[in-house]
Amino acid sequence: MRKLKFLTVSFLLMVAIVSCSTPKKASLQTQINTLDSLVLEQNLTIISNWARPQVTNALQQVMNSGIMPPGSSAGSVSLTGNSNFLTIAGDSISSHLPFYGERQMNVNYGGGDSAIKLKGLMKDYKVTKRKDDSYLINFNAKSESSSESFTISIRLFPNLQGDIFINSTSRSPISYRGEIKKKTTKEVQ
């Protein structure tokens, strides 16, 4: 009798474990298929939640002043409530990403908006699918309003999160983390 109870409980436990893991696998496969489709169609937008600037003495002083968003630190700035995007549509790129860091040259007269604004064609576009079903996208782009050049690497993960790494000819490096979405025709850019 005890043996029968033990086998019954073991069987029910095994059924519960298998049934709980199946939706996760199906959900993960759906996310992987969605990511594959977005990358293949070159039709995606990343809305960033966090900016990760290179920590410098000057940036640390700004953080100490208390003017940065709540929850932020010198190495991680919250973008909650801050409109931003990076969109890949075919062979074109457009972006408006807030910049936190130091600039070396090419500042427009009067300062103006220091955001990373890209609009135009990507150069040297390369996509690599990795063993963990993530993607690495590399390309070069130019600023829409100056001669500033950017080298951009984007890492896209199956959970539809993405990291953007940006190196510039006249700014300190910065990275962003956010959510990957399908670009819609209603987006303002």
Image: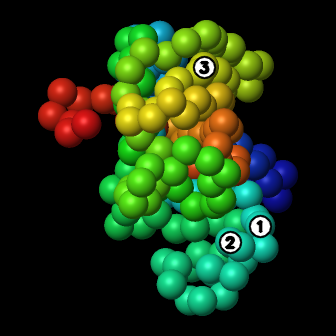
Q: Nearer the viewer, residue 122 or 147?
A: 147
Q: Residue furthest right?
A: 3
Q: Which residue is mark 3?
A: 139
Q: Which residue is mark 2?
A: 59
Residue 83 is marked as none
Q: For label 2, count other residues whose C-alpha is less than 10 Å away and answer few (under 14), some (14-19) or many (20+).
A: some
- Marks 3, 2: nearer the viewer: 2
Decide: is 115 above or below 187.
Answer: below
User: Residue at the spot x=84%, y=52% of the render?
Assistant: 3
Q: Nearer the viewer, residue 180 or 97?
A: 97
Q: Quadrant of the C terminus?
A: top left
> Is 53 placed left or right of 188 in the picture?
right
Residue 56 is marked as 1
* Residue 51 percent coordinates (x, y): 58, 57
Kind of residue at badge 2: Leu
| Cα distance in 3D space between marks 1 and 2 | 5 Å
Kind of residue at badge 3: Phe
Decide: is 152 above or below 14.
Answer: above
Q: Residue 135 appears in which quarter of the rendering?
A: top right
* Residue 69 percent coordinates (x, y): 49, 78
Residue 124 appears in view: yes
User: Residue at the spot x=51%, y=30% of the render?
Assistant: 147
Q: Secondary structure at mark 2?
A: helix
Q: Quadrant of the N terminus?
A: bottom right
Q: Residue 134 appears in which quarter of the rendering?
A: top right
Q: Residue furthest bottom?
A: 65
| Cα distance in 3D space between marks 3 and 1 | 26 Å
Q: Are marks 3 and 1 in contact (CB under 8 Å)?
A: no
Q: For label 1, count other residues whose C-alpha is less than 10 Å away and answer few (under 14), some (14-19) or many (20+).
A: few
